Image (cartoon, helix red, strand yellow):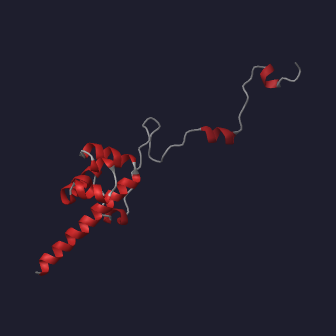
């Protein structure tokens, strides 16, 4: 077999170009030791995100306040979902809302409407 590489005949390891070696080495972050694992960098929320009324509000809190304000019957009429119509429970509705984005968006819109109504009612009382 004369086609074998000379390096393999002599049992010498094949040398890699320096560019390939540099690309294969793990890169480290400045100020970090080789022994400690990399820390995840947390993203900071923008001011627009912080000002959004749904920022930091959990879905369970949204659903509970909407149910308390409007009731299950209104939710069943407004958002056509069977879990609101037949023996509704928070647990089942949360599971459905987490699974289907369109349903969650409807409930979030109702929550935002509720917040606007409450703000309007508050301003109206202050004027009286």
Quadrant including the N terminus: top right
Residue visible at 29% across and 58% down in the picture: 77
Question: Looking at the picture, does residue 64 appear above or below residue 25?
Answer: below
Q: In the image, residue 58 lies at what x, y percent? A: 28, 52
| Tally of numbered tags | 0
Residue 56 in view (yes/no): no
Quadrant including the C terminus: bottom left
Left-right relation of 33 to 14? left
Residue 46 in view (yes/no): yes
Q: Quadrant of residue 69?
A: bottom left
Residue visible at 75% across and 20% down in the picture: 11
Q: Nearer the viewer, residue 110 or 59?
A: 110
Residue visible at 32% across and 48% down in the picture: 82
Question: Looking at the picture, does residue 80 appear above or below residue 127?
Answer: above
Q: Residue furthest right?
A: 2
Q: In the image, residue 12 lies at what x, y percent? A: 74, 23
Q: In the image, residue 72 lies at what x, y percent? A: 23, 53
Residue visible at 44% across and 43% down in the picture: 32
Question: Looking at the picture, does residue 114 appear above or below residue 72?
Answer: below
Q: Nearer the viewer, residue 4 or 87?
A: 87
Q: Nearer the viewer, residue 9 or 1?
A: 1
Left-right relation of 46 to 71? right
Q: Quadrant of residue 57?
A: bottom left
Q: Nearer the viewer, residue 105 or 20?
A: 105
Left-right relation of 97 to 67? right
Q: In the image, residue 40 lies at what x, y percent? A: 41, 45
Q: Quadrant of residue 126?
A: bottom left
Q: Residue furthest bottom?
A: 127
């Amino acid at each position: 077999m004369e086609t074998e590489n000379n390096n393999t005949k002599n049992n010498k390891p094949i040398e890699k170009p320096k560019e390939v070696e540099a690309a294969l080495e793990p890169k480290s972050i400045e100020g970090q030791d080789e022994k400690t694992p990399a820390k995840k960098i947390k993203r900071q929320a923008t001011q627009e995100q912080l000002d959004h009324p749904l920022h930091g509000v959990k879905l369970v809190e949204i659903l509970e306040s909407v149910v308390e304000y409007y009731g299950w019957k209104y939710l069943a009429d407004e958002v056509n979902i069977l879990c609101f119509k037949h023996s509704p429970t928070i647990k089942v509705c949360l599971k459905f809302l987490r699974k289907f984005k369109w349903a969650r968006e409807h409930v979030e819109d109702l929550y935002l409407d509720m917040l606007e109504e409450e703000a309007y009612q508050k301003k109206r009382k202050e004027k009286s």
